[in-house]
Amino acid sequence: MGKFWSHFTPKLGLLMFIGTLGGFLFGYDTGIVSGAMIFVAEEFNLSHGMHEVVVSITLLSAALLPLSVGGMSHYCGRKTLLVISATLFSISSCVIALAANVTMLLVGRLIVGCAIGILSTIGPIFISECSPTSVRGTLVTCYNFSIILGQFCAYVVALIFANVENTGWRFMFGLGAVPAIVQILGLAFLPESPRYLISHWISEGEVSSELEAFEALVQLRPEGYDVKAECDQLKISLRQQGIEKGIFETFGAIVRVKHVRRALFVGCSMQMFQQIVGINTVMYYCASIVEMAGVPDKQHALFYAALITAIYGLVGTISLFLVDSLGRRKLLFISATGTFVGLVMLVISFALISRNAPQLNFTEKSLEQESDSCATILNCNNCALDSACGVCYLDGGSSDTLVKMGSCIEIDDETSEYPDYFSTYGRCDKNHMTSENSTSGLTFSTDACPSKLAPLIIISLIAYLLFFAVGYGPVPWLYNSEIYPQWARSTAVSLATTTNWTFNLLISVSFLSLVDAISQAGTFACYSVFALLSVLFFFYFMPETKNTPLEQIEHLFGLQYEHFSDQNTLETSSADNE
């Protein structure tokens, strides 16, 4: 961080704040969905299927829109796209907050997906292209840290408004418009990306773009810095690299140029691995995972989720100090290895919880029990995992047995609805649970079986997020903003971003189904295999980029596709082009 202060200017500080607000918006939406959707589902009486649609429609639009962002960026610039995305986010926040029906809710979620798709593509590029080489990693990593900060703030907002009846969730979504408006206002005081302006000058021949680029560098570099030399070097480098063109023409060129194609393969693979190790499953379903671990109370589960996210955010600050000193490659390798260990810890913890779950031996006084398939499930954890069943039990409190007189009973989804289900018969049916004579301490849990081993899951989640936050979170976004030549950067980053959101969607919508099919331990075992594969991939295919000017990084991928050393190599292979 010492290097940052030596390069500091007011406009560079404003760039760090306003540029990273896009990451904050990205993180806020991710976190607020986890906290608010419980109340949204109740407000609109959403089925599980519609609940998934409301969440996944954002991921779908966020995955598809970046495909066109590269072409849009070529014509209107980085800064203008950021203004458009922040405007879309503020509009979507208002639409969702004022939603009178499911259709308005879906429209709002669709718009916010478009905003996030643009933000996650252009935000890191804009910061990277404006930053001095020696602090580029720190500044782009701030973007990722702001994602974590947004997620934490979302959980805090959810906790604050959780007890506001009927309208609490509307405030949760509506407050997202505030940072979006701040970003729109702040962008008015920031220059356009100097590299984009010089590229535009080369392609269009507009003298004003050249002058704007020089003025932008003057604002973004400290007093005494040789701006003219950097500007002249950028002109030479960008002329050699070529300029941005239409998305289809650029994609065709990427496919033909071997070293750029290799860079795109590594960049897209990094974004894929970031998602398939399960990070957004943990972020979207953090409260649910804590419930699965044996914390049935939703308020407590939400509190633990906020605590875990806060620790995730604090650890994420470490990467700000390491990414430009330790380097991208070492940092990501350490992070991926630790993420694998954290996932293995989760597998073991969930397996122990399942193995030591209370047995359900209580017999309900009802003939219906004989025809209830749920009644044959004797393991409390297995009963809670079955979407058709719930655990009816007496709370054991602080005693050795948390579940007393427990039984597994079919959920009554005709006269009750999520999240306040009743059983179809027995002590936990609607008649018994709502009567004045209901048994004190009786609980019907459809999501979790109480367990004294729940702290193991929380510790394992913290270990997983700790290692993920250090490198796996920031490096794929930073790396993709660096490794492509100017003519391919926005198109290639668009493709990498689409890869990220596509796998985000696939992993997120499959999580609950996987848990039902192969249990919690089996699901996280799958993620751990992907984490191990990523360790091997980064070890063999990822060159170091620290302290290398953007215009020279592409040459790293001209090397033979073998094990890369930790040292920067700027020699261009004779096989750069087929």
Image (cartoon, helix red, strand yellow):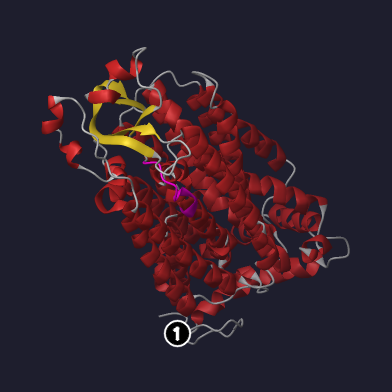
576 sits left or right of 239 in the view: left
Which residue was labeled with disc 1? 562
Q: Specify the quadrant that holds the C terminus.
A: bottom left
Up-down relation of residue 477 to residue 27 (above or below)? below
Q: Please check the rendered image and state whether residue 453 is part of the magenta-colored stretch, yes or no.
A: yes
515 sits left or right of 325 in the view: left
Up-down relation of residue 234 to residue 515 (above or below)? below
Q: Is residue 244 visible?
A: no
In the figure, residue 385 lies in which quadrant?
Answer: top left
Q: Amino acid at mark 1?
A: Glu
In the figure, residue 523 lies in which quadrant?
Answer: bottom left
Residue 122 x, y percent position in the rendering: 56, 51
Which residue sits at x=51%, y=31%?
92
Asked whether 364 or 562 is in front, the reply is 364
Which residue sits at x=57%, y=59%?
466
Residue furthest to the front in view is: 399
Residue 472 x, y percent position in the rendering: 53, 62
Please, what secondary structure does the residue beneath circle 1 have? loop
Q: Please check the rendered image and state whether residue 452 is part of the magenta-colored stretch, yes or no.
A: yes
Residue 485 x, y percent position in the rendering: 55, 68
Give, as a single range, the part of the protein colored magenta.
449-456
Asked whether 170 or 552 is in front, the reply is 170
In the figure, residue 441 lies in which quadrant?
Answer: top left
450 sits left or right of 123 in the view: left
